[in-house]
Image (cartoon, rainbow, N blue to C red):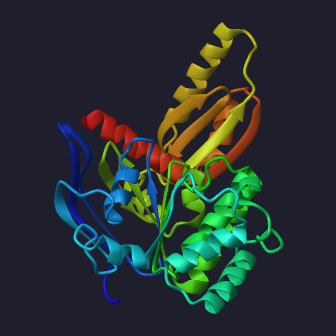
Amino acid sequence: MDGPVIELTDLTKKYGSFTAVGNLSLSVDKGEIFGLLGPNGAGKSTTILMMLGLTEPTSGTLRVCGINPTTNPVEVKRKVGYLPEDVGFYEDYTGFENLMYTARLNSIPEREARERVMHLLERVGLSGEESKKAGKYSRGMRQRLGLADVLVKEPEVIILDEPTLGIDPRGVNEFLSLIVRLSREEKNTVLLSSHHLHQIQTVCDRVGIFVGGQLIAVGDIDALSRKLFSHEPLAIEAGVSLPENPVKAAETIARIKQKLGDIDGIVSVEVSGNIFRSACSGDVSGDIARVILDSGYVLTSLSGKEYGLDDIYNRYFEGYEKQR
């Protein structure tokens, strides 16, 4: 289809006087991996439920694959695969039997269903585990089975709601890599909802920052960084050896912070322990090192980095809290 695959316009959901989602407008294009980032209770899951036709908006409009899920929820479910944070399976069925059950619910012919299920089990890394009862699967295996379950009906859109909760770090990396590979190969549109910044930054083409039921920023990481930190695009961190005496350490920190603040090109200086983090308009790492060393202090480390999603999120979140 032409145009956005997901399109939400002024979408609002209220429960009495409480606004769970307020005036949300968002579009996601075909083949895009879009990350919906926000803390628990921000309204992400409520938004997903409206997109699936499982709850009705108070006002606003939404279309998924060109369909209004409020008036045609069954049609949307045919085109959308949904993986909730807690996947439910028949515990006494094997992985294969659970997927076959889903295939039959979607009226897939038996022979085709068997071939598709075995293919999907291999694709998600569960080949050889198809005869094990789902109740014996680990959390990571259940999420992989859940992804295969989503893919059985060959959806156009995949919605993942906190899909990596409870999975060990290695399993998280493998699962996210699998999502990216499937999206690129099958051209699926993926909406990934999470409160884990690193995971969103790792796999998503664009991100929407969601706080208090409001979508307060949308864009790719580079664009958001340029917008927020246009006058301070570079952060330089300097480690300095401090005196053990707390009073002398505090005096040293104050002196170094003042000296760094006098350097042309440094916008601000923050201190965490013995690390001085300078927001800079350009690379002034040489000036920072010179000032610290010429002042008689021991420089233990010096590094520069561009702002990442954690910096972007914290800056937007701080701005949102000040406006409330």
Residue 9 relative to residue 99: left or right: left
Question: Residue 300: x percent and y percent?
Answer: 77, 35
The residue at 28%/78% (across/down) is 67
Occupied quadrant, residue 296: top right
Residue 58 vertical position relative to residue 104 in the rendered view, above or below: above
Residue furthest to the right: 128
Image quarter (top left, top right, bottom left or bottom right) of the C terminus = top left
Q: Residue at x 61, y 64 (%)?
A: 146
Instruction: Tell me if residue 148 can be seen.
Output: no
Q: Is 73 left, or right, of 160 in this rendering?
A: left
In this picture, is 58 found above or below 28?
Answer: above
Q: Nearer the viewer, residue 147 or 192?
A: 147
Quadrant holding the N terminus? bottom left
Does 249 appear above or below 314?
above
Whether residue 271 is visible, yes or no, is: yes
Q: x, y percentage for residue 298?
A: 77, 30
> Which of these two is toward me, 313 or 110?
110
Q: Decide: is 323 above or below 236.
A: above
Residue 222 screen position, x and y as percent: 48, 64
In depth, the one of 139 and 29 nearer the eye is 139
- Could you tell me how many numbered marks the image carries? 0
Residue 253, given in percent of the width and then of the height, sits at: 61, 22
